[in-house]
Structure formats: structure tokens, C-alpha cells
Image (cartoon, rainbow, N blue to C red):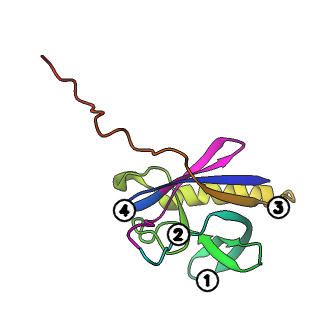
Amino acid sequence: MKLQLIRWYGKKETRALLLKDNKILCKTLEPSLTAAYPVPVCIPEGVYTFKLEYGEEIGWYILLIGADQSIKGQMLPLKGGMKTGEYTLSPVTSYRESGRFSKLAFLKLMDRLSEWISQGEEISLEISSAKTSMRKEQWYSQKVLSD
């Protein structure tokens, strides 16, 4: 099974959508690519396989394994519910700081992934950039101007 992560790079954070068969599984956040210049802290674009791991302090999480069988990143909830980690994809319910609920989004995603893995599915993830910007044009406004 192939999942797809489509990214939009921003000044404060990198936003993405995790898709299965062009349907959204969840939204994700990563560190900003531009804020970390010249050392990027985003997982490089490419294809990865999933590996479930368990740590005493954090519980179950996902490792992203590259073609050379090395660990390239991980999937975990946001640190303290607010902060993105280096080389980490963090599922969220919303991009707004007031309603991200990363732990909940991560647990829902883990439920789906563990179900697919228990059925014998081998899951891969393709990470790529979006072709267009998520942001509305600068001239676009929610306000209606009157004459």
C-alpha cells in the first residue's frame, strides 16, 4: 500500500496532507525548511517504508526507513502538543495552534496503520512538494468593501 504526503513549505512550519488513494488520512506538521537554513530538518522528499517501533518513554511510533535501509525520520505527536521535532512528521487535526490535538490525530492514524500492517500490508510513503501554494493570493480578502 502506498501513502502520499504532499507538502507546502512555510516560514514557521511545513504543512502537509497524508493521503491514501487521494483521500485525506490526516494533516501533518514538520519544522520549517526555511527557518532551519542552511541545515534542513525536514525529512527529504522520496519514498520510505514504515516500521512500527516501541519506546519506553513515548510508546508506539513509526520509523521511516529509506531505500538504503537507514532511518530517515519518524512519525510522532507534537512535543508538548505545540512544537515540531527535527526529522519528524506530526499528525494534527488542524493547523491552528489552538486546535491541533496532535496526540489524538496520531492515535487515530496509528489505529489505521496497525490494522493494515496486521493484515499483512507493507506500507510505503512517498513525500513530495505541492505544485501550488496553500495560501490565498495576497489581494484576496474576507472583507467586503463598500462604495
Q: Amino acid at mark 4?
A: Lys
Asked whether the beta carbons under mark 2 and mark 3 sit within 8 Å of each other, the answer is no
Residue 28 on the magenta span: yes
Residue 142 position within the rendered picture, expressed as x and y whole percent measured from the top left: 27, 31
Residue 6 position within the rendered picture, expressed as x and y whole percent measured from the top left: 58, 52
Mark with earlier residue (1, 3): 1
Q: Residue at x 50, y 74 (%)?
A: 41
- Mark 4–mark 3 Cα distance, whole angstroms, equals 33 Å
Residue 12's tag is 4
Q: Residue at x 67, y 41 (%)?
A: 22
**Residue range highlighted in magenta:** 15-36
- Mark 2–mark 3 Cα distance, whole angstroms, equals 24 Å
Say which quadrant the C terminus sits in: top left
Residue 69 position within the rendered picture, expressed as x and y whole percent measured from the top left: 77, 78
Q: Which residue is mark 1?
A: 56
Q: Image check: 53 left or right of 39?
A: right
Label 4 Cα neighbours within 10 Å, binned few <14 / some 14-19 / many ≥20: few
Residue 39's tag is none
Q: Which residue is mark 3?
A: 122
Label 1 Cα neighbours within 10 Å, binned few <14 / some 14-19 / many ≥20: few
Residue depth check, mark 1 versus mark 2: number of the one nearer the observer = 2
